Amino acid sequence: MTPGSSDSQWPLWEVFLQPPKGEAHEHAGSVHATTAEQALQNARDVYSRRGEAVSIWVVPSASITASTPEDMGPFFDPGNDKPYRHPQFYKVPRGVRV
Amino acid sequence: MPSPVLFDYVLRLGDDRLVLGHRLSEWCGHGPILEEDIALANISLDLIGEASLLLKLAGSLESKGRTEDTLAYFRDAIEFRNALLVEFPKGDFGFTIVRQFLFSVYSMLQMDALQKSRNTELAGIAAKALKEARYHVRHSAQWVVTLGAGTDESNARAQKALDDLWRYTGELFCADDIDREVAASGDGVDPSTLESAWRDQVLAVLNRAGLRVPDAGYMQAGGRGGRHTEHLGHMLSEMQILARSHPGASW
């Protein structure tokens, strides 16, 4: 928090909310906080004021390892030409009702 | 059915929350960081929401046709029944946090007890307010510890706030005839019964924060009887000007 630095904010945390229906936690956004408890409270105040969540996870943003745009080709393209990896590729045998 | 004593009692509950809610709203757009700005505005809205329900109930107990808006916007300072603690200007962030903590613990204990009120409407409002107060305590206690155990400056500011505010905490627990009467009928709670639990909870957090509890000296009171500091009148003039300049306006 030195004056003149480009980011005078506190460390960043990523926020994940579990919707009331009991589904998996989903990324909601991020908050600044100095401790985990403060991050949890800030997430509650910023993202769950309207009853959006039954559970909140906060994770230090620095702890997340993410793929990079350069990974796009090697990571994801090989999946595009392998239709047999989708269940729709297979015909449902006669006699099986869905 | 008109109930003048319960009206007086519920008016105190409502005014505490209306005035403190307004003081907190003064932080909107001025918070130390975006997230805390939103948090303070949230707490402010909780308190104003509680005040709205309580003043509405007060109006119906009075049975003179006054609504929550009439009570909020068309009374002068001398008719307000809030404790002095809540009417001081917001001060610095340390002052706001320490005051919020002192009041929130009080409110939590009070609302917990009021859930058993014989007046079912008041009991319902208390059940809602209790959940909110529990979060207000958690939020403000976390900040009291952060400031108290933080830097020399944050500790000094929190300590000064505590020293300045302590003499106004006694009024929260002063019981008068109104309190005793509503407690006897099972409608209200005698505030003096909340003091020891309040002290225990407040001291536990102050100890963790490394803040020194001021010596119990003279306790200032007056708000419950309409004798306020100069600050309340200034606050009300700002809070009420729109409703008074345009009576009947809706927005």
Image: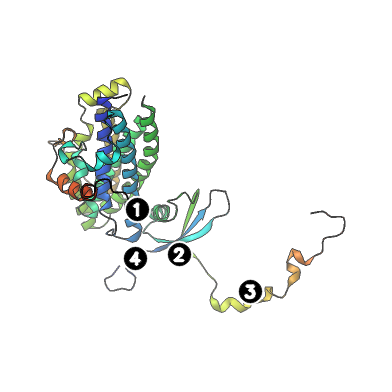
Image x and y of residue B220, in percent: 14, 37
Which numbered circle lies on residue A23?
A: none
Q: Residue at x 35, y 63 (%)?
A: A10
Image x and y of residue B214, in percent: 17, 42
Image x and y of residue B146, in percent: 30, 53
Image x and y of residue B86, in percent: 22, 43
What's the chain of the residue with tag 4? A
Which numbered circle lies on residue A9?
A: 4
Q: Quadrant of residue B222?
A: top left
Which is nearer the N-term, disc 3 or disc 4? 4
Which is nearer the N-term, disc 4 or disc 2? 4
* Alpha carbon distance from label 4 to label 2: 14 Å
Residue B228 relative to residue A96: left or right: left
Q: Residue at x 31, y 31 (%)?
A: B60
Q: Quadrant of residue B32?
A: bottom left
| Residue farthest along the right direction in this orientation | A95
Reading the image, the residue beneath label 3 is A76
Both on one chain, marks 2 and 1?
no
How many C-alpha atoms fall within 10 Å of the one at disc 3: few (<14), some, or many (≥20)?
A: few
Q: Nearer the viewer, residue B233 or B200?
A: B233
Q: Could you tell me which secondary element the residue under label 3 belongs to?
A: helix
* Alpha carbon distance from label 3 to label 4: 35 Å
Q: Nearer the viewer, residue B217 or B69?
A: B69
Reading the image, the residue beneath label 1 is B39
Residue B15 relative to residue B115: left or right: left
* Alpha carbon distance from label 1 to label 4: 16 Å
* Alpha carbon distance from label 3 to label 1: 41 Å
